[in-house]
């Protein structure tokens, strides 16, 4: 794709404030990926939905849920509606051990609707963090056993269960990436972890001009352990 350069940064959808691709009621910006896409790529990719029955079914189910329940269904309800629309019978949950209560509640809700839920917590295997190279002084509690998050094992165990869809509940940034990479089933999110903002990461974006204006600084936050030293 060609784009418009500003300094060393190539403009893309992350710089767009128009969103004309949604309904064609405005004008495309000069750098729009829709109008600047390599010739034939939009058509070629669109054909994939037709050629792949599984991808087409997911796309259609998602679009219909959006149309039927826009602004009415919660994320939990949309997830359950999607499971029903897809005909999934066995669903996996990769949960943070700190959100087991939320995982348990979701499982109860899903099972009440006839959905088989199989959950795997992030600390499964109880492997100490030092095994992958973290030093004792880098632990939250140096000198004690501290299990690593084990997203690859989570994915492996869910793969063994032949789950048809896997749901992420609060996995850490990066750990979720590894889980998605190794999951054989499609993955969707129910809860995105944000310990500071009660799992509502968008709040930091809304507050970037006020309470969270520190986000606009080129500096990243210092590790909390420096505050303890």
Image (cartoon, rainbow, N blue to C red):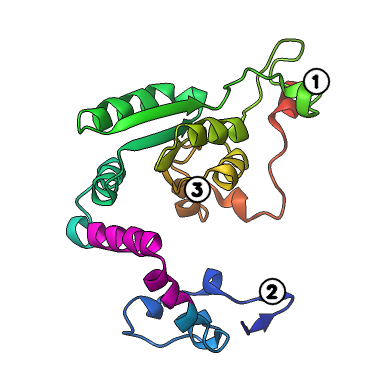
Relative to 214, say whether 141 is above or below.
Answer: above
- The residue pinned by badge 1 equals 137
Highlighted magenta segment, given as a residue range: 45-66
Q: Secondary structure at mark 2?
A: strand
Relative to 204, say whether 48 is above or below.
Answer: below
Q: Is residue 157 left or right of residue 9?
A: left
Mark before the other along the chain sequence, 2 or 3:
2
Q: Is residue 163 left or right of residue 1?
A: left
3 vs 1, front mark: 1
Q: CA distance from mark 2 to mark 3?
A: 24 Å
Residue at horizontal 52 percent and vertical 72 percent from the top: 13
Residue 204: which disc?
3
Q: Secondary structure at mark 1?
A: helix
Q: Quadrant of the C terminus?
A: top right
Relative to 176, say whether 32 is above or below.
Answer: below
Residue 36 on image: x %, y %:
55, 87
Residue 159 on image: x %, y %:
51, 37
Residue 79 on image: x %, y %:
31, 45
Q: Is residue 37 left or right of residue 165?
A: right
**Would you say the residues marked 2 and 3 are in contact, meaning their CB atoms lie under 8 Å apart?**
no
**Would you say the residues marked 3 and 1 are in contact, meaning their CB atoms lie under 8 Å apart?**
no
Viewer can see residue 146? yes
Residue 9: which disc?
2
Residue at horizontal 60 percent and vertical 30 percent from the top: 153
């Amino acid at each position: 794709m060609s784009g418009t350069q500003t300094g060393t940064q190539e403009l893309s959808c992350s710089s767009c404030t128009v969103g004309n691709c949604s309904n064609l009621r405005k004008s495309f910006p000069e750098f729009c990926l829709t109008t600047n896409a390599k010739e034939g790529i939009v058509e070629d990719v669109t054909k994939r939905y037709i050629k792949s029955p599984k991808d087409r079914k997911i796309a259609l189910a998602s679009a219909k849920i959006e149309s039927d329940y826009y602004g009415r269904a919660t994320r939990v309800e949309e997830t359950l509606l999607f499971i029903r629309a897809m005909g999934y019978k066995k669903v996996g949950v990769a949960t943070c051990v700190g959100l087991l209560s939320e995982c348990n509640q979701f499982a109860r809700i899903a099972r009440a609707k006839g959905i088989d839920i199989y959950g795997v917590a992030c600390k499964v295997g109880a492997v100490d963090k030092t095994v992958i190279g973290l030093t004792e002084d880098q632990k939250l509690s140096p000198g004690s056993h501290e299990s690593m998050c084990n997203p690859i094992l989570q994915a492996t165990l869910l793969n063994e269960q032949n789950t048809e869809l896997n749901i992420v509940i609060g996995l850490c940034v990066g750990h979720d990436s590894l889980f998605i990479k190794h999951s054989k089933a499609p993955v969707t999110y129910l809860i995105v972890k944000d310990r500071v903002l009660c799992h509502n990461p968008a709040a930091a974006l809304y507050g970037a001009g006020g309470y969270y204006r520190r986000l606009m600084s080129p500096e990243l936050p210092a590790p909390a352990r420096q505050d303890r030293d």
